[in-house]
Image (cartoon, helix red, strand yellow):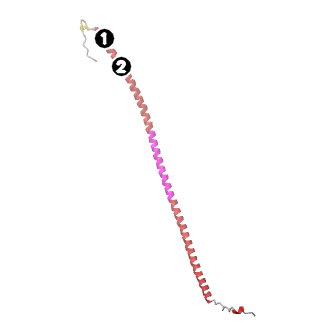
Amino acid sequence: MDKRIFDTMKNGYNRYQVDDYMQTQKLQMDALQKKLESVNRELEMLRQEKKVLENEYRKLNDNLHIKESAASEMARMAMKEANMIVDTANQNADTIIKEALMMARGILMEIARLGDEANDMKSSMKEELHKIEEALDDFETPAIPKMNLLKKEL
């Protein structure tokens, strides 16, 4: 409040100045009261809005935490499943390799057996050829008769 100096009169201060001042102060006080009420209403609205936003934030934060946990769990499960798939693939690959090696060993054994048979057959054929060659060498052709004898008539 302002300090105001009023004119003095016989029975005290100038009543009109005091009444006018009081009226001005009352108007200012009423205006300030209305402004205070308006600010208090706005403050209450902001508090309610803050409370609503805090609740919404809490819900969103809780929801985010739940989703992060779910995503983390899904990632863990996916990693576990991927590891299981890799392990199974490794086991299957080992089995396939073992089977391929067994088949290759069988094929090599069959090739070795066929090679032995071919060598045996080659030796046998060489012996037969040698016998045939000896037989051919021992074969004597008869003397060829003279062709003159055929030309004479009987």
Q: In the rendering, at what x and y percent does residue 122 appear?
A: 58, 79
Q: In the rendering, at what x and y percent does residue 66 appear?
A: 46, 42
Q: Quadrant of residue 141?
A: bottom right
Q: Is residue 44 magenta?
A: no
Query: What is the three-letter code of the residue carrying label 1?
Result: Asp
Rendered residue at 46%/39% (across/down): 63
Name the one closer to the observer, 138 or 50.
138
C-alpha span from label 2 to label 1: 19 Å
- Neighbor class of circle 1 (other Cα within 10 Å; few <14, some 14-19, many 20+) is few
Rendered residue at 53%/65% (across/down): 100
Q: Quadrant of residue 19?
A: top left
For this orientation, the residue located farthest to the right is 154
**Height in image: 117 above or below 30?**
below
Name the one closer to the observer, 143 or 76.
143
Residue at which label 2 appears: 33
Instruction: Give the left or right position of residue 66, taking residue 11 as reference.
Output: right
Q: Circle 2 — which element?
A: helix
Name the one closer to the observer, 100 or 2.
100
Q: Please provide the residue range marked out in magenta.
A: 62-90
